[in-house]
Amino acid sequence: MIGFQIVNILIILIFIGLFILFIKHAGQYIQTRVRLSWLLGAYLAVLIISFLLLNIIPQEEILARDRVGEEELEIAARAERDFYSALEEGWLDQLEGVYKLGSWDFELEEEEEWLLIRNGDETHLPFTVIIDREGDPGRIQAHYYVTRTIFRQVDVTPELEPPHVSFEGNRLIVEESEWQEFEVASFQREFVVRQFSPGKPGVQEQVQPGERVTSVEGARIHSTTGDVSVFGEQALYLKVPEDIQVGHSGFPGQVRFMEDLPR
Amino acid sequence: MTVSSTKNSLLETVKKQYMFKLRLYINLFISLIVVQVIAILFSSGGVGSHGTSTGNINFFEKTFSSDIIIVFSLMWAFFAAVLLTTRDYRDMDFVFIGNRVSSNISNMVFLATASLVAGFTAVLGGVLPRVILYYSLGPHHILSDNYFLSLGDLSLAVLATFLYLILICALGYFCGMLVQLSKAFVVIIPALFFGTLITASAREEAHLVDYVFNFFVEESSLSLFLVKVIFTAAVLFGSSLLMSNRLEVRK
């Protein structure tokens, strides 16, 4: 432990030595004072221009996007909590905050007696498949439902994509859509200013809307730095004819039949 | 009348020396620019990040701030203040007719000016990555909290940074003067500093450096912080002035 600290201190001392040498000799290779002044002036100009540019950036472009309000957060959290019961009990249309991202309709051959739902990927699919046998004869209807996904109070639901669903022979092939990256940049006030913000240093960013939203009992709300995230639920809802045999492959524990569910 | 003319003469000398130093020590500002540009480059990748995923979407958040730029500027301020106490820099004062007092006061005024410039550029240095991110990442991927900086925010940040810089300059000047008094302090000061850190961390308890640090960092009132900084800087600069006179007597 002490040895590790000594190595750290040596590194710091070397760094400090280089720093001093640098400060002492910086500028000596630039021969004239006029050039030095120009360099200083140019640096200041770039910084001032960047400040002016920051202030002409349309604020609504940034502000309009983020900060989902508390009420919407509650709706999203409630939808996430009640999603499966609503889907399985048939009252999904009454649940606020549920979106249909994709729908497919396939015709079945008359003589088809069985259907295989196959995971077209080798990976685990991040949603459940619910099968309802009360579908129209000769047709398979698929709907992909999601509840809102809110990351750091930014609604990213429009970024979500449905899976790829295709029908070949008597196989319904479900494949995951491409993995998506959602990157956000957040900003902190300078540490020299944070101490003057109301409350303790750093608390400025720890306003806890999540605590108020947790009034939605049982909802999974993720609050790390004070900003709330609600990760939505997703499900592929299939309506198949009553008389068809349904099998599945590649969905360990992810396929549920409506008739098997407790009502 | 004599006191007044002496005061005027001291002020005049300080003013001349200050103006002279502003031109002569411009290389210190160049080193500040380089230090800040390096810090801006370090900051442009973000000072922190965390990620999570749900479904088939990866969320990744990067946090940006000017903290690294300010810390680098504080380090620059400390060593720039130390440099001003070295013989090379003190010898430059002989170009002017003056004394240790005028030389020290002009150094302090110069350090105050340098702190103001460094504070201003350090805070604005944090604005540049914001603008670049707006155009590179796009507005839809920027969380608005603390993104925009009003003139009031800017002024507060510059003032706070300036105060920290003044404090560090005073400390650097004081340490530099101690070293000029006796070269033994080149070893004693770092040994004391790091020694306190090592022993305290080994015992896992708060130490002197912690107390001193918290005295300033945990102050939530700007006016009280201002008083603390002015008082501490005055004590440190005043002590440096006394040490400088002693240095002159010894020579």
Image (cartoon, rainbow, N blue to C red):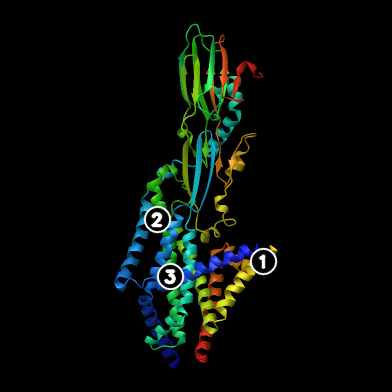
Say above or below: B115 vs A82.
Answer: below
Question: Which residue does the image show at 38% across and 78% down from the upper left?
Answer: B21
Which mark lies nearer to you, 1 or 2? Answer: 1
Q: Of marks 1 and 2, which one's residue comes earlier in the chain?
A: 2
Q: Quadrant of the N terminus of chain A?
A: bottom right
For label 2, the residue is B128
**How far is mark 3 from mark 2, CA to CA?**
24 Å
Badge 3 local density, few (<14 within 10 Å), some, or many (20+)? Answer: some
**How far is mark 3 from mark 1, CA to CA?**
32 Å
For label 3, the residue is A22
Based on the displayed image, in which of its 4 quarters is residue B218 positioned? bottom right
Query: Which three-letter amino acid code belongs to the residue tagged 1?
Result: Ala
Where in the figure is residue A48, as x and y percent of width and height?
A: 36, 59
Q: Residue furthest bottom?
A: B2
Query: Which three-letter amino acid code belongs to the residue tagged 2?
Result: Leu
Is residue B206 at all visible to an observer of this figure? no
